[in-house]
């Protein structure tokens, strides 16, 4: 269930197969609140097929079990989904900084965003963090950087280059270097705000 590279996942799968052990990569989408509510989403990759017993076990912890393909494909899918999440995190930090320069109330903006077509469960869940109303750490910024590095590595291994992934990774690296690594990934908003001309 860890967020690891598809290459490592496949390596583990081959090792498991050599010992006649069934390997299933089953990373999840969902934060602490989703885990507590049993509403995780599983992304499953396995070359052996998903037995009813394993499916039932995963279904106890989550609201859906999505079979993505062979071993390693669950971990690849997780990196793709997390790339969207970290892209959302990045743009929320940017629009909050821009809103401040337009004298737009940040709480009102976040309410609007949450109610709009652009809103998402991730954004709504992290709104108190974006607004500085909470300092909880549900997903450390350093882990977000690790995810985006894995996504970048995956793209490069396929001979691809993507501007969004590269940009997000660079920003997360800069934020980590500036001391935000142990804060929640929503702290990217603080980092971006602090790097605007009026705050330098």
Image (cartoon, rainbow, N blue to C red):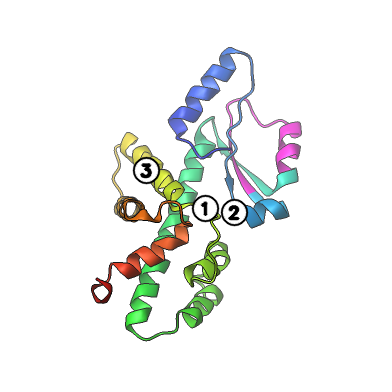
Residue 42 is one of the magenta-drawn residues: yes
Q: Which residue is label 3 attached to?
A: 149
Nearer-N-terminus badge (1/3): 1
Relative image position of residue 58 (x, y in whole percent) = 70, 40
Residue plotted at (50% across, 43% down): 77
- Whether label 1 touches label 2, CB < 8 Å: yes
Nearer-N-terminus badge (1/2): 2
Q: Which residue is label 2 attached to?
A: 31
Along the line of sight, which residue is nearer the eye, 61 or 56? 61
The residue carrying pointer 2 sits among few (fewer than 14), some (14 to 19) or many (20 or more) residues within 10 Å by Cα, namely some
Relative image position of residue 72 (x, y in whole percent) = 50, 32
Q: Quadrant of the N terminus?
A: top right
Along the line of sight, which residue is nearer the eye, 27 or 194? 194
Question: In the rendered view, does 172 fall on the left or right side of 8?
Answer: left
Q: Which residue is label 1 attached to?
A: 139
User: The residue tagged with tag 1: helix, strand or loop?
Assistant: loop
User: The residue tagged with tag 3: helix, strand or loop?
Assistant: helix
Task: For marks 1 and 2, give the CA distance.
Answer: 8 Å
Task: For marks 1 and 3, give the CA distance.
Answer: 16 Å
Relative image position of residue 133 (x, y in whole percent) = 53, 71
Residue 133 is one of the magenta-drawn residues: no
Range of residues picked out in magenta: 41-59
The residue carrying pointer 1 sits among few (fewer than 14), some (14 to 19) or many (20 or more) residues within 10 Å by Cα, namely some
């Amino acid at each position: 269930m860890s967020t690891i590279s598809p290459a490592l996942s496949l390596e583990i799968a081959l090792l498991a197969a050599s010992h006649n052990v069934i390997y299933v990569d089953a990373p999840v989408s969902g934060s602490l609140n989703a885990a507590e509510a049993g509403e995780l989403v599983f992304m499953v990759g396995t070359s052996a097929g998903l037995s009813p017993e394993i499916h039932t076990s995963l279904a106890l912890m989550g609201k859906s079990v999505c079979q993505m393909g062979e071993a390693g494909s669950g971990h690849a899918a997780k990196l793709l989904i997390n790339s969207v999440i970290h892209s959302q995190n990045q743009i929320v930090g940017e629009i909050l900084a821009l809103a401040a320069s337009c004298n737009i109330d940040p709480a009102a903006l976040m309410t609007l965003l949450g109610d709009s077509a652009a809103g998402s469960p991730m954004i709504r869940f992290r709104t108190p963090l974006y607004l500085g109303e909470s300092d909880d750490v549900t997903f450390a910024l350093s882990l977000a950087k690790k995810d985006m590095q894995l996504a970048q590595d995956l793209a490069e291994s396929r001979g691809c280059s993507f501007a969004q992934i590269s940009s997000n990774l660079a920003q997360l690296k800069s934020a980590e270097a500036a001391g935000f690594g142990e804060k929640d990934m929503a702290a990217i908003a603080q980092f971006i705000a602090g790097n605007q001309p009026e705050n330098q």
